[in-house]
Image: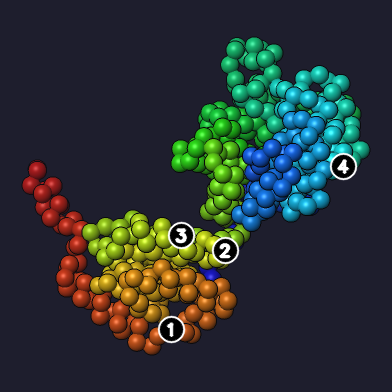
Amino acid sequence: MSELFPQTRYQRRVTRQLHVGDVAVGGGAPISIQSMTTTKTADVEGTLQQIYALAGAGCDIVRCTCNEQESAEGLAHIIPRSPLPIIADIHHQYRRALEAMEAGVQGLRLNPGNIRRPEHIKAVALEAKDRGIPIRIGVNGGSLDPELYEKYGGRVTAEAMVESAKRELAYFEEVGFDDVKISVKASNVALMIDAYRLLADTVDYPLHLGVTEAGPPPAGLVKATAGMATLLAEGIGDTIRYSLTADPVEEVRAGRWLLESLGLRERRGLDLIACPSCGRAEVDVIDVAARAQEALTDLNIPIQVAVMGCVVNGPGEAREADLGIAAGRKRGHLFVKGEVVKVVPESEMVESLVEWAQIIADGGVEEALRRKDEGAAAEAEADRMALLDDKGVDANHAEERIELIRKLD
Ligand code: SF4
């Protein structure tokens, strides 16, 4: 199999460490993936169903809203049955935080813009300290303390957001509580990046990254990725959440893809690559790739699979993939690490990929290579040569275009 956890080149920022249940955050721990349930927390069965779906997708920590007493009561039922540690999201009422701790949550998130009375903040911190529960100071550009908003000229700035976090920290320090992580989220990506950079220079607490209210995919995905990937590549960030207007399972998948593609988490699921298609393509690559993605995702196998439009260049271009298929002359050439192992009819391309992915999952690349059809390589080469004869070496007509370009002079 391909290297599952390539050595990351990013020097991680040194932070303290805390634990949300049994998940370590900061201090060199793997970057954790969070999401948030969209159900009413009082709906115990519905919320648990969603939590199980999130866990299955690779979520590490889940957040549930705790905005009314019924939510806290729901948490009391949910927590003992949850496969993931739960953080209660507290809105305006500090009492909900006390209730959530009573229910057994493994973490709290407080928004300093919403709970502003020092005695309330300190009461929550004291209780969290006694119970050993970490708190995230979750500053949000959209709900900044109005006083800070005014102080910084009626604008949300990186400095204002960091000051909000520091004020909350000061209250915590007064009662000797430091089991803290911090976020300074904004929906404006540039602002969010500035705020996290400033915060990272100011404190050594673990940081929770996110672009808030990023919106629906694909634009929301791009915005959130732009913000978080920039910071992660600078070593900033210890836990992440995609805030998408979508099924929260999509948030978790995006989080895993981001961390896996940066080499910051071990690959857990499928990595499907596909060629962009060109004048050589012998099949509708978009359609085959979409069907392959759907068929293979459910297998949850940590391999890289390539779907390539032609047998002339496909196996070579994707020779690093664990498994791949390339189209040619109404057939599919299956290859493992660039070596053709079987030639199948075009109509069976996707099901053959699934079959061979399972062989690799069960016995590794070596087993797949051991099972290769002896005649496959020769058959594949014959198809390849025939296509080269049909279309020549310049199927994309690049030389013709170059001629036209030169005539313009
Ligand atoms: S040469 Fe073949 S594999 Fe490469 S982009 Fe074109 S169709 Fe895809």
User: Residue at label 1?
Assistant: 372
Residue 295 is situated, as x and y percent measured from the top left of the image, at: 47, 63
Label located before the other in sequence (4 or 3): 4
Q: Residues within 10 Å of mark 2 (few under 14, many from 20)?
A: few
The mark that comes first in sequence, 2 or 1, is 2
Looking at the rendered structure, the secondary structure element under dot 3 is helix
User: At 65% across and 48% down in the image, what residue appears?
Assistant: 50
Looking at the rendered image, the disc whose residue lies closer to the viewer, 4 or 2, is 2
Nearer to us in this view, 253 or 172:
253
Answer whether residue 179 is visible to the viewer in this image: no
Q: Nearer the viewer, residue 230 or 361?
A: 361
Q: Which residue is mark 3?
A: 293
Element carrying mark 2: loop
Labelled disc at residue 300: 2
x and y, in percent, of residue 95 in the image: 83, 28
Identify the residue under disc 4.
Answer: 132
- Any atom of ligand 1 within 8 Å of the CB at mark 4? no
**Mark 3 or mark 1, earlier in chain:** 3
Mark 2 or 3, nearer chain start? 3
Q: Which of 124/315 is in front?
A: 124
Q: Quadrant of residue 350?
A: bottom left
Alpha-carbon distance for marks 1 and 4? 56 Å
Q: Quadrant of the N terminus?
A: bottom right
Q: Vertically, is 298 above or below 255? A: below
> How far is disc 4 from disc 2 in space, using C-alphas?
35 Å
Q: CA distance from mark 2 to mark 3?
A: 11 Å
Characterize the local packing of mark 1: few (<14), some (14-19) or many (20 or more) Cα atoms within 10 angstroms.
some
Instruction: Say which amino acid is labelled 1.
Output: Lys
Residue type for callout 3: Gln
Q: What residue type is disc 4 on?
A: Gly
